[in-house]
Structure formats: C-alpha cells, structure tokens
Image (spheres, rainbow, N blue to C red):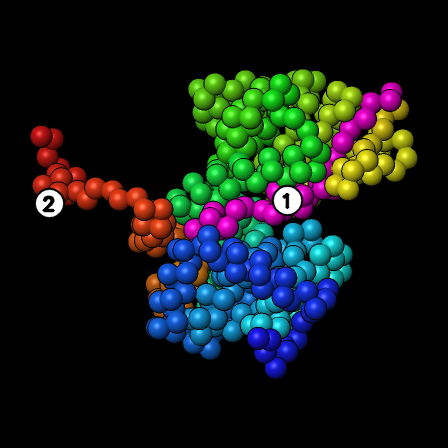
Amino acid sequence: MPRTSIPPHEVADLSLAPEGAARIAWAAEQMPVLAQVAQRFASERPLEGIGVAACLHVTAETANLVLALIAGGARPALCSANPLSAQDDVAAALVLESEVEVRAVHGEDLDSYARHLQALIAGRPRVTIDDGADLLVAAHAAGPSVVDGLIGGTEETTTGLVRLRRLEREGGLRCPVLAVNEARTERALNDRHGTGQSALDGIIRASNVLLAGNNVVVLGYGWAGQGVAERARGAGAAVIVCEVDPLRALEARMAGYEVMPALEAAERGDIFVTVTGSRRVLRGEHFERMKDGALMANAGHFDVEVDLDELRGLAIGPPAAVRPLVEQYVLPDGRRLNLLARGRVVNLAAAEGHPAAVMDVSFALQALCVEELVRRRERYPPGVQPVPVEIDREVGRLKLAALGVRIDTPTPEQESYRESWGLA
C-alpha cells in the first residue's frame, strides 16, 4: 500500500506507481544476491541513519539497491544519471511506496539534471553512489560544508574513475572512493556480459537491423568492448576492432578479430559501436568515409563519443527521425548516416540496460561497499581505493550459489604450497 508521507520529489507522474512496483518486483526475482545482502542488512542495520545520495540510472534494478539500503537503515535519495534511461513508473513507485526522495524524469534536460544534483547535495549526504562521478564532483564544488561531512563514495563507471583519479592527482579528492567498476565480478558480469548483450539489444530494438552478414566495428576493446564484439560475432557479424592500446589490440587480434585504425574501418563498417569512455571517437574525418546507410551507436558513457557537432555541421539540414530512436543525417553527396538514441548510451536509451541478473552483482557490490565505508571508515584515506578482495569474493560466491554451482576448495596441502617459497 502507498505510504501516507510523501517526500520531496520531482517525477513525471505519481499515478504510475503501481506499474513501477510491478516492474521492481519482477527485477527482484532475478536479483538473489542483492536479496541476501538486504536480508542481512535488515537484521543488522549497519547503515542506521546514514544519508546516501545516489546518481544512477533510475531503473527497476536500481530501485532494488535503494530498497536494500533502506533495509540497512540508510536514508537514500536518488536522481537520474541519464535522462533517457529513467523509468518514470519506477521513480513514482519509490516515492509513493518507499518514501524515497527521487528526482528523475525521463527525457529531462541538462538544467533539470543540474538542479536534481544540487537538491541531493543540499541534503548533505554521508555517502555517495555515482555513475560518472557528477554527484561527488558537485559535492566537492559545494565546499567544506558538504564535502567535510562525507564518509566516502562508490563509483560504477570507468569514465567516473578517470575523472576522480584526475581530481586525486590534483590534490582535490577529499574522501575515499571505492572503485566498484574495477572489481573482478563487476568487470566480468557487468561490463562483458551485461554491456555485450544489452548494447546489441538496444541496437536491434532501435533499428531492427540484421547483424548477420554485416561488418560491425567495435571501437574500444576493454571489458565492455570484448562483450560487444563477442556477441556480435555470435550473431553472425564480421567484427572489426579499433584500439589505441597495443595490448588490447593484440588481445583482439589473438581472439580472431580484424584490427585496424578507425579511419580504415570507417570505409568498411555497416554498424559502428563506440565503447571507449572517451570523446570524439567518431568525428568528421570518419563520417566523410562512411558508407551510405551506416549506423552509429554509443555503448560507452555520455553522449560525447560520437561528435554530434561535426555530424550536424556536415549534414544538409536537421536530421530526419526515420524511426523513434534513429536520426538520419544526409550529407552533401547524398550519403545517409544513421545515429541511434542521439548518441546516448544505447543499451539504456534504446533498451532496458543490463539484465537484472547482471545488476544483481553490481548492486550487491555497491551495497556491501557502502557498508564497508560506514563500518570501517578508518581504513580508507582520501583517494580512489580498490574494492576489498573479500567483498569481491563474497559476491562471486553468492552468485555461484544462486546459480546452483559448486566449486572446489583447496586442500591444506595446496594452501601451504601456494604460500610457500618451495619449488617442489
């Protein structure tokens, strides 16, 4: 039943709450690891009274993380990290059913986003959970009255960690941040399997393109790029990989992919997927070489991997909306280039993001890292810190148990041998 107390909020329509509650419950059925964490939290209450501000994709999976934090005694507040990923019904359900301060509207503009960040910061949270570091950077910009009260934060993305490490190098990071994105379970499940499946899901939903027989160019061969390349090849595509890191490029080549500079791939690709977390990965010089009908999608972070300004500058007039999530730019020579989801993260803007079974691992890590920061804050000086290996292993163990998988345990002899200096 809806609660009688409605917290401060900015959502599209509170009447959508019943649909959101059903969506949250469906996701919960596929998130057994987070459920076990929440069950323990409910009995131990390790986060009692702790204000937690989260800037994340407002989805049913995120809602289950928020509910786990509430079970632990936290006072969470949530805003959307991406305007096209926000699920309005989920936002409404969290406000009405769980009395959570939520500020998220599907399609919100940048001014609204900035206002929502500031509203969460005004609550002076003790812990932040970020997807891109905007929240924690804004908290630092707010000055000592906010940042001095921070116990720490967690970061979900590679891009966010790049920003925070730069802040740390400049001497400006004043609290610890646990690098959830770099946990082993996170990279294997979220980046490789989650992005690999959900990015192609978004491309197919938006365009209805057949992958088989097409040349798919994957720009970036990190964990997420590996997943995209692997799934595209499995669907029958010929995959070309573009990289700037020689070791990753070597990995791609040894995995059987063609590897070449992006300018060469631009002439051959039918579908381009950026997975770098960097800026202007596809730009004017690439657009000038692309085939008629080429399709571009971003599965990295933010809408900066495809240079929209240069694309608009090359095109004749504004783009045509040929499908709900496909904008077609016509160049002076008549070639048509198709951009999916306005260059935003395609798996969230055109689909539903990672499957709940993947986010089960990510958000279990997030919940346990928040607990770690609160309970053992003296262990963590300011700076980007790795997720403790025992948390990583525990989440892996719980996920295997949920899948009904058992593994071996080293014998005492094997443990002794592994820890010894002996050669035989």
Residue 134, numbered label: none
Q: Is residue 274 above or below residue 16?
A: above
Residue 71, percent across and down? 44, 71
Residue for point 16% across, 39% down: 418
Using residue 101 as the reference point, say whether residue 113 is left or right of it.
right
Residue 326, percent across and down? 76, 37
Name which quarter of the figure residue 411 lies in: top left
* Number of other residues with Cα within 10 Å of mark 1, as a class: few under 14, some 14 to 19, many 20 or more: many
Name which quarter of the figure residue 243 lies in: top right
Q: Nearer the viewer, residue 183 or 213?
A: 213
Secondary structure category for the residue under label 2: helix
Q: Is residue 260 above or below residue 77?
A: above
Residue for point 63% across, 44% down: 351
Secondary structure category for the residue under label 1: loop
Q: Nearer the viewer, residue 388 or 201?
A: 201
* Number of other residues with Cα within 10 Å of mark 2, as a class: few under 14, some 14 to 19, many 20 or more: few
Using residue 244 as the reference point, say whether residue 49 is left or right of it.
left
Q: Is residue 189 visible?
A: yes
The range drawn in magenta is: 333-361
Amino acid bearing label 1 = Ala
Question: What residue is pinned by disc 2?
Answer: 412
Residue 351, numbered label: 1
Residue 100, percent across and down? 58, 71
Is residue 355 a member of the stretch shown in magenta? yes
* The C terminus lies in quadrant: top left
Residue for point 61% across, 42% down: 347
Residue for point 58% across, 46% down: 353
N-terminal-most mark, 1 or 2: 1
> In 3D space, how far apart are the residues under numbered discs 1 and 2 (Cα atoms)?
48 Å
Amino acid bearing label 2 = Pro
Of marks 1 and 2, the one in the foreground: 1
Q: Is residue 378 visible?
A: no
